[in-house]
Amino acid sequence: MSSTGKSPWIVHYDGSSCNGCDIEVLAATTPLYDVERFGVVNTGNPKHADILLITGSVNEQNVPVVKQIYEQMMEPKVVIACGACACSGGIFRDCYNTLGGADVVVPVDVYAPGCAIRPETIIDAVVKGIEILEQKRKALKNKTLVEPDVSRMQSARDKVVDGQTVAEIASNSTLE
Amino acid sequence: MSNKTVIPFGPQHPVLPEPIHLDLVLEDEKVVQAVPQLGFIHRGLEKIVEKRDYLHFVYVAERICGICSFGHSLGYSQAVEGLMGVEVPERAEYLRDIWQELSRIHSHLLWLGLLADGFGYENLFQQAWRLREIVLNIFEKTTGGRVILSVCNIGGVNRDIDNDELRAICDDLDKLLDGYKPITETFLDDASVHSRLDGVGYLSKEEAEDLSLVGPFGRASGLDNDIRSIGMGAYGKLAAFEPQLSNIGDGYARTEVRINEVVQSVQIIKELVSKIPDGPVYNKPKGNPPEGRFLTRVEQPRGEAVYYVKGNGSKFLERFRVRTPTSQNLAGLLKILQGCDYADVPLNILTIDPCISCTER
Amino acid sequence: MDNTEQIYKEIDASSILSTIHAYHDEGWRFAQLCGSTIEGGVEVLYTLEKGPVVENVLVNLPNDAEIPSISKIYPASFVFENELQDLFGIKVNGISVDYEGHMYKLSVPSPMNPKSQARVEFAKRAQAADQPEAEAQADTQAEAQAADQPDEAQAVSQPEAEASAVPAGQAGGETDEQ
């Protein structure tokens, strides 16, 4: 295992979440669960990080921010969607301002469920992420790194508001 | 001629776990103006009250915010009970207030950890969150969840806590106070804490009244705005309740008020446990909410939250509205940021205890 | 159980400022301001409290009405008035910190009130042009609006007048993501 596998650094961003999953991510670094003994450091700088933890169903305003954090991270990198909202939009899937999960904006490697996610699940997800990180590191070394799967990403125009997609609302002149 | 620069603060920042963006206009090292940019957590959940029936919506309401989660489900339930005229059994009112006070303790410990981390005292951050695990353990034993409890419902609560368990909770809280008192006494006496918090973000009582501040932010300037003094629910059965006030009005006073509130909450829980009556804990509501409106208030850890519901006879409510304490305190935040040093900006933001996910819903 | 007496008074849009002034002079605290969509318009609710007593003031407005701001009387109300503009399409004049309808970046304008002018125009613009052009048109119109507003540096070099702060919310949000 390489040094990144033995000590992955994480950066955490709250993309329109209720905060429950975020405080559990922080609680994973506190003495009861203590991921720092595995070498995991919660850094604030995306360029120092290997793993991105996204919480929350991403909203319209957060899309450029999340994309920028993702692009600033160095290869190889892994994205973990923490919590039900980041996986698929959660209980807020029907709201007018949520796009529905982090995979709308960035390609996600690990989906970790829970509402709010438990710290044990976060540790499990990071361990799975480390395996994927190792594969990506080897592929990068052999120059065979594959482009991420972007088939699930959608534009804001396919989002459903009040039973119609935004594109349909825009093309209807009679509303309701 | 001094130079003016605009520095963006956030939305991704190591000091705050939540995204808020501020454009700080600086003149040398002093902040001249702060312009906030909100909207990073706006999900629009008030509109889905038209799609989820009133019994199911309590699970959406408690996910407005993960830190003050129980308070939101309590406020929503109180508002719909007032609209429908549902009687809540007495034991349920005591249990609700016990969970609400536990929620206050865990929120203040969380805030204390983040404030200390903002200073650079990482050890105090770890200690405060280690003590907080005692409260989260109590939540898990009694409700099954650490953060989102799903226990408050319209007409009462979903589960009971038996009296032996309540006494065990009091013993656990005593152990929490044994660990809590030495570290907070050291923290409040420390010279470097004084030098960083004394005089920072000062607001007089008149300014606090003018800005309509709520919660410990206003109480540190001497404003008596605690909703628990009104005596709704089981709070009316307490022998005496005095809100924690201070008339110093700066960052140090706000820290002291919150630290004292934790000790007061433990005493309130012990008093409620000694007085709790036996009986049922749930009274199932019948029918749909009638046409009408109801407005109620709850004392959240960050201040007074106002809940407003409108019914129209069907099983979907017509309107649900939450006015959260941080959205009311934003004007106060902009006031204390004006004229402060650039290095004090994270501290000033942390001393008001912001909860941006509540603000934007 | 909450046994507070529920008091609701209905007033006209023209007497908003005088009523709120009277409450302020008698020492009432501002609690909240919210809108809700009703048949034919929007209903705005102002809540004021003094100790245990709570009084509510209701104003019935037609779609796209204009009302004066109370942020000179109660500065804490600016957040809620901006929200009223963004989500319901009601124009509020004279807010102390005015985002001019761009406090939240929404995918559909005025989502809580589908009959407001902004929402109806959004649909017509898209119907008149082709689908992909409609989105681009909406974006360029928004950018033109942002360019018209003075940006922060210029606003600050004016003499110290807090009330005249007009943030270029759009420009700030798009360029400063670091």
Image (cartoon, coloured by chain):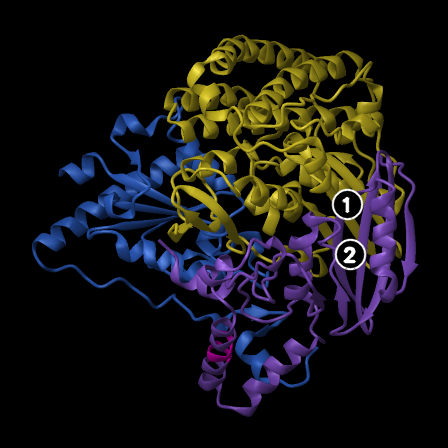
Q: Nearer the viewer, residue A111 or C57?
A: C57
Q: Residues within 10 Å of mark 1 (few under 14, many from 20)?
A: many
Magenta portion: prevailing SS class: helix
Q: Nearer the viewer, residue A78 or C14?
A: C14
- Mark 2 — residue? B317
Q: Nearer the viewer, residue A89 or C20?
A: C20
- Mark 1 — residue? C30
> Is residue C44 depicted above or below B298 in this figure?
below
Residue B349 visible here: yes
Give, as a three-letter code, the residue at label 2. Leu
Q: Residue furthest left?
A: A142
The hue used for chain C is: purple
Residue B211 lies in the magenta stretch: no
Residue A89 x %, y %: 51, 56
Residue B348 x %, y %: 51, 35
Splitting the image into 4 quarters, where does residue B269 fall? top right
Give, as a three-letter code, the residue at label 1. Phe
Q: Residue furthest front?
A: B1
> Is residue B62 depicted above or below C1 in this figure?
below
Which chain is represented by blue in the image?
Answer: A
- Which image quadrant: the N terminus of chain C? top right
Q: Which residue shows up at 42% across the image and 63% down it?
A: C174
Which chain is represented by yellow in the image?
Answer: B
Front of the two marks 1 and 2: 1
Q: Which residue shows up at 51% across the image and 61% down it?
A: C155
Q: Chain of mark 1?
A: C
Please provide the residue range marked out in magenta.
C138-142
> Is residue A29 depicted above or below A173 in this figure?
above
Query: How far apart are the alpha carbons under marks 1 and 2?
Result: 26 Å
